[in-house]
């Protein structure tokens, strides 16, 4: 039976940008090769940990939301355990309320991002107008 899952994993902070992307692509490929449908993914970036893990106080967080069967989740978690770049991971099965919440959160985040882009798009025009007025005044 296909369920919807959410998995968050923490990668070691000593990775370069390319190594981090390569790690994410590896786990994305594992999911797609096993027939999982990736609903959403987010890169949360470098964050401070509440307590040290493997003598490290920060890590790169990444989230996958996907639809798959239990065997796929087992295979994914086995690869998490084998990969030395992964410090911690957590996979949870999402019920209908968690799915609705995640969709609402994504919609809010997308709306905020769109509003931010509109503000940024408008600002350079205003700055150019001000600089033109200053040049004309001189």
Image (tube, rainbow, N blue to C red):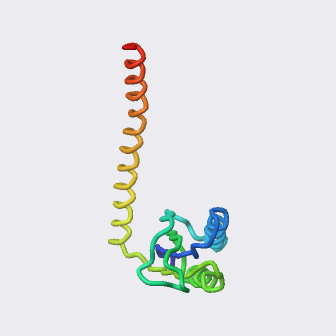
Viewer-nearest residue: 64 or 62:
62
Q: Which percent across, then down, holds residue 71?
A: 58, 83
Q: Which percent across, then down, holds residue 94?
A: 41, 75
Q: Is residue 94 above or below residue 112?
A: below
Viewer-nearest residue: 81 or 71:
81
Q: Is residue 57 left or right of residue 22?
A: left
Q: Is residue 67 left or right of residue 50?
A: right
Q: Would you say residue 66 is visible in this rendering? A: no
Q: Is residue 80 left or right of residue 67?
A: right
Q: Which percent across, then down, holds residue 62?
A: 52, 69
Count the labels in the image: 0
Viewer-nearest residue: 71 or 122:
122
Q: Would you say residue 60 is visible in this rendering? A: yes
Viewport quadrant of the C terminus: top left
Q: Quadrant of residue 23?
A: bottom right
Q: Is residue 134 left or right of residue 59?
A: left
Q: Is residue 116 above or below residue 104?
A: above
Please report the residue visible at 48 percent of the width from the left and 65 percent of the height from the top: 44
Please report the residue visible at 37 percent of the width from the left and 14 percent of the height from the top: 137
Q: Which percent across, then down, holds residue 123?
A: 39, 34
Please report the residue visible at 38 percent of the width from the left and 68 percent of the height from the top: 99
């Amino acid at each position: 039976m296909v369920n919807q899952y959410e998995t968050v994993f923490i990668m070691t902070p000593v990775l370069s940008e390319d190594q981090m992307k390569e790690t994410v692509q590896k786990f994305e490929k594992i999911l797609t090769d096993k027939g999982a449908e990736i609903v959403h993914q987010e890169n949360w970036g470098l964050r401070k940990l509440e307590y040290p893990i493997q003598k490290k106080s920060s890590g790169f967080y990444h989230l996958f939301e996907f639809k798959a069967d239990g065997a796929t989740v087992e295979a994914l978690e086995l690869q998490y355990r084998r990969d030395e770049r992964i410090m911690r991971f957590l996979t949870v099965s999402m019920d209908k309320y968690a799915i609705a919440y995640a969709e609402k959160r994504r919609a809010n985040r997308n709306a905020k991002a769109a509003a931010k882009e509109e503000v940024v798009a408008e600002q350079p025009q205003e700055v150019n107008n001000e600089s033109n007025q200053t040049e004309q005044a001189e």
